[in-house]
Amino acid sequence: MKISASLYSNKSKKLEALIEELDSVNIDMFHIDFNDKKVEIEKIEHDIKRIRNVSSTPIDLHIISEEPSKYNNFILRNNIDRVAYQLEDIKENEFDIPNSENIEFGLAITSNTNIEVFNKYSDRCSYILLMTTIPGESGGKFNTINFKKIRHFKKLYPNKSIHVDGGINDEIGFVMRILGVQSVVSGSFLVKENISKSLLKLKSSVVNSQLKVKEFMISKEECPIIDIKSSLPNILKKINDFDFGYVLVENSNKEFVGIISMADVRRGLIKKEFDIKNIDAHDIINHRPVTIRTSDNINYMLKTIQNHDFLISFIPVVDNKKIKGSITFFNLINSES
């Protein structure tokens, strides 16, 4: 996951000094917010020239304007690397995105905007920027409804990227990596204190967090669930349809009784000498998987994982024998491999 540093979140340090410090820790991008109701374009262009005089790090521009098309020439002549347009502020009927193979364009939306609005712009935008606090405000709290929006967007647009801006600290950054977010913008948390320590925290898998599992887990409605009497073909179809690599298993009372992963399927096939017709869930289920509860926090979840000497790539979330959801770690594992 890439980190974009929000430059204007630090107003006390000279821009060149801030750029030098961020480059010394190999920051991925510089994020600039441009709201044309609050700042003149000349100021933004001057700052970009100052940045380019001392650094070649990619610039990530967020435009908040009623008429963003009028800044197309500005974008092209300043060699901006990434540009996101704030949808809710646009008053133009059809705003024009410049033609450039060297610039990545995206659509920014607030927490209250439906994710499906991306449909209209999906042919021109390669990513969505989820504004998880109030756009333009530094130091706000992350709105947790965006956890579900991230999963929903990934399902609807698997070939598009997700970028997140707002309330990004070490615990939220950790969850972003679990969810497979491609990049985050960090302002107050990253640039107001010790930058190197803050960046290390954003990229670390060791996090001290009381954030509850229920806030970011995959809900039951989104999980692959089968009945204990399911046949092997039905199990494989469910695994394939959800692409999670596992299914959760319930009995006739809708109680959680175990999991079946692809590894369990392989072991069952070998044991039964590939007699597919005579294999069902009873033959291959793992009745004693590692589980957690909705009330558990990230700290407890990480300790649970660390207490086992085998790789845990997902955990069912179960309360009183009832499936509540699950958490997968495939994105986190891939990001660290």
Image: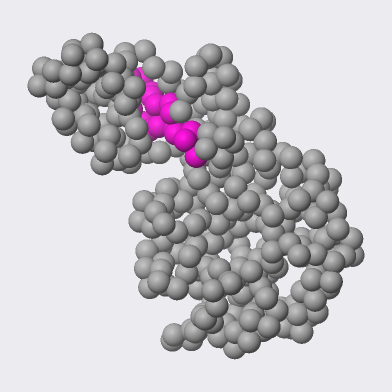
Residue 332 in view here: no
- Image position, residue 27 (x, y; %): 73, 53
Q: Front-most of 244 and 193?
A: 244
Q: Is residue 292 one of those drawn in magenta? A: no
- Image position, residue 3 (x, y; %): 66, 52
Residue 271 in view here: yes
Does residue 189 appear left or right of residue 313 in this picture? right
Q: Front-most of 147 and 312?
A: 312
Does residue 129 appear left or right of residue 51 in this picture? left
Residue at the spot 17% in from the left edge and 25% down from the top edge: 232
Residue 74, quarter of the rendered image = bottom right
Q: Residue furthest left?
A: 277
Is 323 above or below relative to 39?
above
Residue at the spot 43% in from the left edge and 18% down from the top edge: 290
- Image position, residue 147 (x, y; %): 48, 47
- Image position, residue 45 (x, y; %): 75, 80
- Over which residues does the magenta segment extend? 314-331
Q: How many marks?
A: 0
Is 276 above or below relative to 117?
above
Residue at the spot 54% in from the left edge and 70% down from the top edge: 105
Is 297 above or below relative to 84?
above
Residue at the spot 53% in from the left edge and 14% down from the top edge: 309
Secondary structure mostly seen in magenta is strand
